[in-house]
Image (spheres, rainbow, N blue to C red):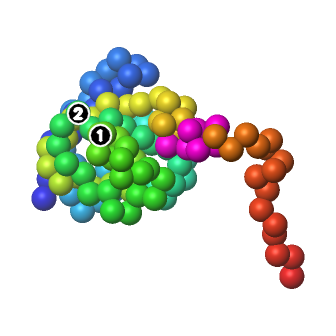
Amino acid sequence: MNYRVRVHDRRTGQIHETQVSGDRYLLESLEDLGLDLPSACRHGCCTTCAMRVRSGALDQREVMGLSPALQAEGYALICSSYACSDLELETQDEDEVYQLQFGRYFARAQRRWWQWRLPLDHD
């Protein structure tokens, strides 16, 4: 099924409108249509592709890098999400979403960067 998507790009001030299929990742569909959107891991782990959902519904079952609380607040990682309805989305500042997702946890720990290292098993 196809859905209408409107993307408000805060970086450029442009609004893009298009149709996407509900059986493909949203980021891939938008890129195929010529939109140049931020992305990095493409596995739903980082926050580079984060968008704010102004209206509509997404299937985010495959997303690992965004808490259910932030999803409920209207954030989505579009690299691993599918459209379930017509959507209105807004690009976000990656650092802002990263801080919301991860920053508060690291800030509480009072550790230096080298103290976060995990032991590696060398065969």
| Residue to which mark 1 is pinned | 74
Q: Which mark is drawn over residue 54?
A: 2
Q: Earlier in the sequence, mark 1 or mark 2?
A: 2
**Which residue type does callout 2 highlight?**
Arg
Find out whether residue 54 is within the magenta segment. Answer: no
> Which residues lie in the magenta part?
101-107
Residue displayed at 38% across by 63% down: 62
Q: Are marks 1 and 2 in contact (CB under 8 Å)?
A: yes
Name the amino acid type tagged 1. Answer: Gly
Q: Main secondary structure of the magenta part?
A: helix
- In terms of depth relative to the viewer, which is nearer, 31 or 94? 94
Magenta highlight on residue 103: yes
Q: CA distance from mark 1 to mark 2?
A: 7 Å
Q: Classify 18 as above or below 61.
A: above
- Residue 10 at what x, y percent from top left? 38, 22
Q: Measuring 18% from the left and 54% from the top, which residue is drawn there?
A: 84
Whole-percent x, y for residue 105 in the image:
58, 44
Q: Quick one: quadrant of the N terminus?
A: bottom left
At 38% from the left and 31% from the top, the residue drawn is 91
Mark 1 vs mark 2: give the one in front. Answer: 1
Residue farthest along the bottom direction in this orientation: 123
| 97 up-or-down from 80: above or below | above
Q: Quadrant of residue 5?
A: top left
Q: Residue at x 17, y 43 (%)?
A: 56
Where's the C terminus, which quadrant?
A: bottom right
Residue density around tag 1, few if under 14, some if 14–19, many if 20 or more, within 10 Å: some
